[in-house]
Amino acid sequence: MKEIKMPKFLLAEEPTGPNDREIFIYSPHYLSLVLVIPEDDITVLLNNEMRQKPSKTFQYEDETFELVIFQNNVLHAGGVLSPEISEEEFLNQAWKFWEDYLIWEDRNIDENQSSQFN
């Protein structure tokens, strides 16, 4: 029998949206949502409220990604399902999840195919 555990992060998107739909990482542990902005592929104009949210830029090979905490409950939810962490550490963990996905995608998705998330 397999034990089902709540994942720390999940990929999330609006599947019926347009092809340039946003990519999110959701954390059920921290009840928070991270917007993934692939800076080399799209330009996203953030309003004043969004520019004030915690964010961090990361590199994967020759690509640049901006991760923005879109819905932030990190400081409120920590300790219930996961240890208390800072927003920066949360972004680092979300990045590790996204980077692992990109590595998996590079290994498993043929160049002639496209991922549903890209």
Image (cartoon, grey):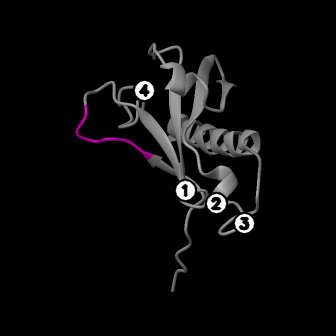
Q: Position of residue 24 (x, y in %)?
A: 47, 40
Would you say the magenta stretch is mainly helix, strand or loop? loop
Residue sticking out furthest to the bottom: 1
Q: Amino acid at mark 3?
A: Gly
Q: Residues within 10 Å of mark 4 (few under 14, many from 20)?
A: few
Residue under the image location 76 percent in, 46 percent down = 86
- The residue closer to the viewer here, 106 or 74, is 74
Q: Position of residue 49 (x, y in %)?
A: 52, 26
Q: Decide: is 72 above or below 102.
A: below
| Residue with the mark numbered 1 | 31
Residue mark closest to the camera, 1 vs 4: 1
Q: Gap between marks 1 and 4, in whole Å?
A: 34 Å
Give the side of residue 18 with respect to residue 108, left or right.
Answer: left
Task: Looking at the image, tell me whether mark 3 or mark 4 is earlier in sequence order.
Answer: 3
Task: Looking at the image, tell me whether mark 4 or mark 2 is earlier in sequence order.
Answer: 2
Q: Quadrant of the C terminus?
A: top left
| Residue with the mark numbered 2 | 77
Residue under the image location 66 percent in, 22 percent down = 61
Task: Looking at the image, tell me whether mark 1 or mark 4 is earlier in sequence order.
Answer: 1
Q: Amino acid at mark 1?
A: Leu
Q: Gap between marks 3 and 2, in whole Å?
A: 6 Å
Q: Which mark is residue 79?
A: 3
Q: Decide: is 63 above or below 18.
A: above
Magenta range: 12-17
| Residue with the mark numbered 4 | 111
Q: Position of residue 75 (x, y in %)?
A: 69, 52
Q: Position of residue 2 (x, y in %)?
A: 52, 80
Q: Residues within 10 Å of mark 2 (few under 14, many from 20)?
A: some
Q: Gap between marks 1 and 2, in whole Å?
A: 7 Å
Q: Gap between marks 3 and 1, in whole Å?
A: 12 Å
